[in-house]
Image (cartoon, helix red, strand yellow):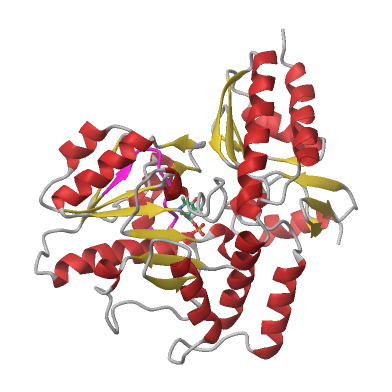
Amino acid sequence: MKLDEIINLDKKYFMNTFGNRTPVCFSYGKGVNLWDIDGNKYYDFLAGIAVSALGHSHPKLVDAIKQQAEKLIHCSNLYYIESQAKLAEKLVNNSCADRVFFANSGAEANEGAIKLARIYFKKKGMPEKFEIITLEKSFHGRTLATIAATGQDKYQKPYSPLTPSFLKVPINDLDALEKAINGSTCAVMIEPIQGESGVNLTSVEYMKGVRKLCDEKGIFLIFDEVQCGLGRTGKLFAYQHLGVEPDIFTLAKALGGGFPIGALCAKEHVASAFEPGDHGSTFGGNPLACAAALAVLDVLIDDGLVENSEKMGSYFMNKLSDLAKKHSTIQDVRGKGLMIGVQLSIDAAVEVKNKCFEKGYLVGSVGKNIIRMLPPLIVTEQDIDGMVETLDSILQEYEL
Ligand SMILES: *Cc1c(COP(=O)(O)O)cnc(C)c1O
């Protein structure tokens, strides 16, 4: 089909939640590159929003999916599942968690985290503890409970009344958090690095303070690592930068390398609150999803992608900092590993994103003035040079 035919079909039959999408349809991907249906080549510096961590069509991921699909795609969680058991073991062996539950998305993993924190206190005879404190500008998903957890009006307004019992405090403000914690609080839920709101980092002192407060008050610390987890920031988990461990954390995006799967991970003292019948999923942790995720973790850990993320992240940040010296339109460059935000001093993020697209580079924009970049973790210096040169030439147009 031709692009305009596809667009016409979409406009006629698909619910218009995504508005006017970027006018392109990709048909093939390899490594860091994508090709559209007309054969044009692109450099993917968004990776499906931090999903395609191994790049596109990674042979080990493709093989794992093919082999598992030929054997068994789905079977119910009423039965034992080999790839699920192995994936749970692998996540536990490489993180601070003792137990894992598999969902199908980030929002669903977060729902599981919220339910787990609440049920723990119910079972301990403290049913009054059900409130969760989250951060302003956070993003935790699109289900009714997770939009209530999310600290952004635009996702919430159309759906009020919201699921009750989520309080918001500003990022990196320990006093505000301490004041907000009350007798109803059961947990604090935080993205170690906020993604959707433009790459906002929590500080080490803040997170150490949060951990201490949670311990003193006997409440849980939940990390939403749906976007920043799994090597994105140059360590396997973002909490490893912060010198603290969460009681519960969630994963999704990169976990299946593009195959949908999410994970709820927790330490034993809280995980054991889930007993038979307390939570469940039809698709979550099915043989195919877990086989894909096992392959992703193998490649991330054994093929040095986490190290590459750290190395290429520093290289990228240095190049962007140099670019910022040259262009007054760059106000701030921030991030960790390959999770990078470039804040412009002009409201031109969408325009710059579109110009990047026209030059064959896919990036994201947040609001009016932030460019977000999340390339696959296999990205090379050469790819980054191309991206930086492209940004350089585009920003040149804005110099007075
Ligand atoms: C993307 C994202 C989610 C939601 O994940 P879905 O798979 O879209 O439900 C939740 N939290 C964070 C931090 C995210 O980046």
Residue 288 percent location from the top left of the image = 61, 79
Question: Which quarter of the figure is the C terminus placed in?
Answer: top right
Name of the residue lying farthest toward the top: 400
Q: Compared with residue 393, is residue 71 higher up or lower down, i.e. above or below?
A: below
Q: Main secondary structure of the magenta part?
A: loop
In this picture, residue 83 sits left or right of residue 52: left
288 or 298: nearer the viewer: 298
- The residue at the point 61 percent across, 77 percent down is 291
- Horizontally, residue 29 falls left or right of residue 256, namely right
Outermost residue, bottom side: 79
Number of marks in the image?
0
Magenta stretch in the rendered image: 133-144
Q: Residue at x 57, y 67 (%)?
A: 260
Q: Is residue 398 magenta?
A: no
Give whichever of 143, 262 is nearer the camera: 262
User: What is the quadrant of residue 144 in the picture?
Assistant: bottom left
Q: Is residue 167 visible?
A: no
Provide residue 175's location: percent of width, then percent of height: 21, 32
In percent of the image, x 80 and y 51: which residue is there?
33
Relative to 254, does residue 179 appear above or below in the rendering? above
- Was residue 138 drawn as part of the magenta stretch in this picture? yes
The answer to which image quadrant residue 52 occupies is: bottom right
| Rendering coords of residue 98 (x, y %) | 36, 69
Q: Quadrant of the N terminus?
A: bottom right
In the foreground, 302 or 26: 302
Q: In the rendered view, does 83 fall on the left or right side of 264?
A: right
Res 212 seen here: yes
Residue found 27% across the figure and 80% down from its top = 275
Where is residue 110? Give x, y as percent: 39, 60
